[in-house]
Amino acid sequence: MPKDSGIGASSKRREDVRFLTGKGKYTADISVKDQTFAAFARSSVAHGRINSIDIAAAEAMPGVLAVLTGEDFAEVGGNPAGWLITSRDGEPMKEPKRSPLAIGKVRHVGDAYAAVIAETAAQARDAVEALDADIEELDAIVDMSEAIENSDNLVHDEIGTNLCYDWGWIEDNKAAVDAAFESAPHVTSLELVNNRLSPNAMEPRVSIGDYDASTGDYTLHTTSQNPHVTRLLIGAFVMGIPENKLTVIAPDVGGGFGSKIYHYGEEAVVLAASKKINRPVKWVCDRSEAFVTDAHGRDHVTKIELATDKEGNFLAVRTETQANMGAYLSNFATVTPTFLHGTLMAGPYKTPHVYVNVKAVFTNTVPVDAYRGAGRPEATYSLERVIDKCARELGIDQLEIRRKNFIQPDQFPYTTPVALVYDTGDYDATLDKVAEIGDLAGFAARREASEAKGKLRGLGISTWIEACGIAPSALVGQLGARVGLFDAATVRVNATGSLAVMTGAHSHGQGHETVFAQVVAEKLGIAEEQIEIVHGDTSKIPFGMGSYGSRSLAVCGSAIVRATEKIIAKATKIAAHMMEADAADVVFENGNFTVAGTDKSKSFGDVALCAYVPHNFPHEELEPGLEESAFYDPANFTYPAGAYACEVEVDPDTGEVDVVGFAAADDFGNVINPMVVNGQVHGGVGQGIGQALMECVVHDGNGQPLTGSYMDYAMPRANDVPSYVVDHSCQTPCTHNPLGVKGCGEAGAIGSPPAVVNAVIDALQSGGINVTHVDMPVSPSRVWNAIQAAK
Amino acid sequence: MYNFDFVKPSTVDEAVAALADEDAQALGGGQTLIPTLKQRLAMPSKLVSLKGIEGLDKIFVDRGGNLVIGAAATHAQVAATTDYPALASLAARIGDPAVRNRGTIGGSLANNDPSACYPAGALGSGATIVTNGRSIEADDFFEGLFETALEEGEIITEVRFPIPEKACYMKFIQPASRFPLTAVFVAKFADGVRVAVTGASNDGVFRWSDAEAALNTTFDAGSISELSVDADDMISDIHGSSEYRAHLVKVMTARAVKAAL
């Protein structure tokens, strides 16, 4: 019997009641008394010199209260990169200053160079059109190779190069890797593009800056996955506001996928403008703005080589990647292609030699940063595609080549040549499982049926691993992180036994309110309904690094467990006092404290009441009240892994690809809520199918975006994805966190793109069409072009 | 959007009068115009809604056997008809339910988007576009990208579709917009076959006369197997090259013929 509450139960998502009935409270729903509205003047050219901005006409427009330009921010700090990367030559990365509004130059279409504050949003927008900006268009830097070679035309003149860093991982491996390639019996090589994606959260970004002149307090309501990080960035780096004077509130957040991790200039502008005019300032991003201002994802160009023996045993992997940073360094831009990408290039395989080189490049395009998976999809795609190609070259079955190279269960903990220590896993188990649930044995018959309809059917396999539960602070500090990556929680037991749990993790759709309540309910033996989850407000929660990197449960969930354990420890002492027993003899089980060997019993509620009405209370030993906090810093990353099988039908006449089957067998360690995990996998796989077949941000040679709306940016819809078959019964619990959980939020987006593309290649090959690679998105026209080229 | 005046006349004559003002713009279902206004890409002084004119959305079969569709009939209304299944099927596949419940046949034809569905249906059927002042044959109505034979202030009132013996609309969608990347409307009448192509050409909807001639001889997909489509005037963009679109014209035509049988 499945459980109906607590850990392991598919408790219904309590937040969905308000989300699905239109009662969610998002930032745009907030109206602050006397609020005004901001609109931004954004560059229409990708690269230009700002000769002058005449604001007089705009200032004279009806309702206009203030006009701000980059000069208003000349004295404040820049929006920093969160991670310092050191190049192969030992030099630190190049880090140009990023002002909230552009100063001197505009560097991408959409780059904001002025803001107008007015009584209404329409007045602000009208006044933006009245601004007279003399912006001299410069040649745009779009192509990454040209950007590296061309030192005359620079995105940032002051750093003297378009190369942010040239990183090697691990530099000491390089000679051994090169030697392995020299002597390898077989080398498979593949050049591929990991396409640039627009995050497209359903809720566009919104920020309301509210300065109170009477107290000097700033409040920022904003769409954020991590309000404390935003407060830290604004307070300590950009605006110089002490943390006690800045509250950041992110209420319900309608999706983020990474794009709402970062601090954006608009947040600083509404705060500064609010102080300037002494009224609240609200900005609501529209979809067109979102396309050119939300940090994009991916955008790698990679050459990967795989050295093997004739039997397909992996000997070495070598990659060279150009990673597009866009025009500025967004907060996590520098770590995504390095420590979230290069460190994963071993995959779940025992490849002895691995070397990764990444060149990060500035271009006149929208900044790129972490997007669902962040570096790990890029690593997985490169690796799983080159393995697929290698297997074809050597005539080895796709499952077999993976099996013979898997790290074996008895090899854990396993140190990879790219410096991660996998704690546990069983990669054959998930591959066996996907073969079962995907009915791979029946594939041949399904292929025959497709062929009878004139379609080519392909099967694609991907066995993926990722490092998440980000991250051990001491380790990431050594690697260049400028923040710690612990998380925190406070468990507040109310006098009548109900609870509020304040969490540093902040849901932007994941279901924290349900799942965290399940964890606490299980530990305390009380009903989930008695537990309220509080998040998203720096004035209410202790601290937190937020939600990204599939970390909420593994890191913040662990903090919640630790805080709950402290509650139980204190409550046990109180109960012992109440029952006149030795605390060592008190047992806490199913929400009741009992004394072993007696019929004495106190419920959790009785003890809570005693803590707040402490008439009969061990005052000499304990303080009254029942509230505990815990900070949890993980000992290691967690390493979820899995095996995906995708089946496609390709229409050889049109190139159209139809995903007709998708099976996912994942090892997420222990699972708290199977239904929520299913939802996370469904969403992630949907995003991965979107990347594989449909989505791509395209800029023309002048840096003009050609995909600035849904008319040209192809988002997957329900009828573009199949009914998934999902399993997470293969569980090797994480060895170093108290719940044994690994994280599931990004898995689908990491593991699925190569499965889809491998399936397309398999389909084409089955029709005798010798196509070895098609770059994502594998659109009908690209497939058709590949078929024509193969003829 | 910018400010504009809004009127909703109750007769065609009042609408025509309202449109006489400088920069006045007719508003059908607004499925193209409203997004354009929201992006501040148009600045009409006045919007003249055609949704308040009684009877302008009527749909009936006239004594000549033509399906007559009022200009203000929505795609959803046309999709619900049974007299001309291929045309109903075309309407049922435009956009999504929200678009189909707002968008009108008159608005679509007057806009003449090179990737819209209705121009292929009208041209492929040899329909007659009736305005407040005259009747225009479909062959004379479409004059290139977003260009039609309509005069300034002229309003489409209804569209008369002869009902063919067999017909089919075969659409290959552009993956983002879901408009046709290339779509073909094939209709077989007693006096000949018409093949209209949308989404493909730089000049908007057009008739593929070679295919019509071949299909007039034998109405069979095999009849066009030796034909090819000139890619020179085809649209080329991030969703497909001109060669790809030219290829799709042939594939979609063959499939339409096959499905119409």
Image: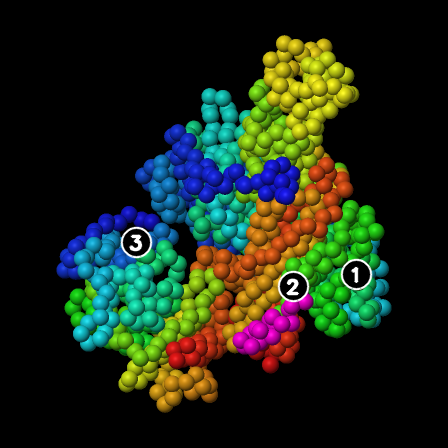
Of tags 2 and 1, the one toward the viewer is 2
Residue A416 seen in the figure: yes
Residue A651 versus residue A450: which sits nearer the camera? Answer: A450
| Disc sitting over residue B43 in the figure | 3
The amino acid type of the residue labelled 1 equals Asn
Residue A211 versus residue A669: which sits nearer the camera? Answer: A669
| Residue on which disc 1 sits | A405
Quadrant of the drawing holding the N terminus of chain A: top right
Span highlighted in magenta in the image: A440-457
Is disc 1 on the same chain as disc 2?
A: yes
Taking B169 as reference, is A408 left or right?
Answer: right
Badge 2 or badge 1: first in the primary sequence:
1
- Quadrant of the rendered image containing residue A401: bottom right
Chain letter of mark 3 equals: B
Taking A790 as reference, is B168 left or right?
Answer: left
Q: Is residue A710 above or below residue A605?
A: below
Label 2 packing within 10 angstroms: few (<14), some (14-19), many (20+): few
Residue A268 seen in the figure: no
Magenta stretch prevailing secondary structure: helix
The amino acid type of the residue labelled 2 equals Asp
Disc 3 from disc 2: Cα separation: 58 Å
Disc 2 from disc 1: Cα separation: 23 Å
Q: Is residue A790 magenta?
A: no
Taking A113 as reference, is A733 left or right?
Answer: right
The amino acid type of the residue labelled 3 equals Met
Quadrant of the drawing holding the C terminus of chain A: bottom right
Residue at 51% in and 51% down: A200
| Residue on which disc 2 sits | A439
